[in-house]
Amino acid sequence: MSLHWNDASLGRARRIVDNRYYNIHYEAGAGGRTMSVIVKDLGVVLHDLDPGTRYEFKVRTVKDGLTSPFSDVVTAWTLDQS
């Protein structure tokens, strides 16, 4: 699954030139397995997701020891393997 987001604090250039990173939190199904990944870019490709499964994703920024609130939750489904 490929996820991409915008960071309004970067301005029009959308270039990351500081020490910020992004914490992506995601959950499989309702009350399912919860995972988290940290990236230093405005997108990530997640592998090893369960086929035919609903996932909920949210992102937050961490910079200089400060953490933003999580974004709104986005829901997506992986394809069945059949």
Image (spheres, grey):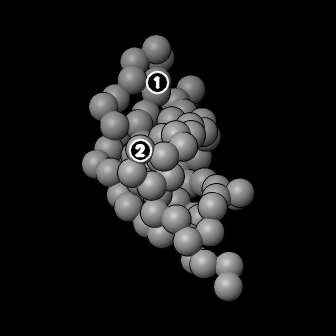
- Choose top left, top right, bottom left or bottom right for residue 70: top left
Q: Residue at x 46, y 14 (%)?
A: 65
The disc, 2 or 1, on the residue closer to the chain's N-terminal end is 2
Amino acid at dot 1: Lys
Quadrant of the rendered image containing residue 33 = top right
Residue 11 visible in this rendered orientation of the protein? no
**Residue 82 falls in which quadrant of the image?**
bottom right
- Give the alpha-carbon distance from disc 2 to disc 1, as whole Å: 29 Å
Q: Is residue 49 above or below residue 63?
A: below
Is residue 28 at all visible to an observer of this figure? Answer: yes
**Few, some or many C-alpha atoms within 10 Å of disc 1 (few <14, some 14-19, many ≥20)?**
few
Specify whether 64 is left or right of 48: left
Spot the residue most to the right.
48
Residue 56: image location, x then y, percent? 41, 53
Residue 47 point in image, percent of width and height: 70, 58
**Residue type of the residue flagged with mark 2:** Gly
The answer to which of 19 and 33 lies nearer the viewer is 33
Residue sitting at the far top: 65
Q: Write the residue at 56% across / 54% down.
A: 43
Secondary structure under the numbered disc 2 in the rendered image = loop
Looking at the image, residue 56 lies above or below residue 33: below
Between residues 17 and 36, which one lies in front from this camera angle? Answer: 36
Which residue lies under the disc numbered 1? 63
Mark 1 secondary-structure assignment = strand
Mark 2 — residue? Answer: 31
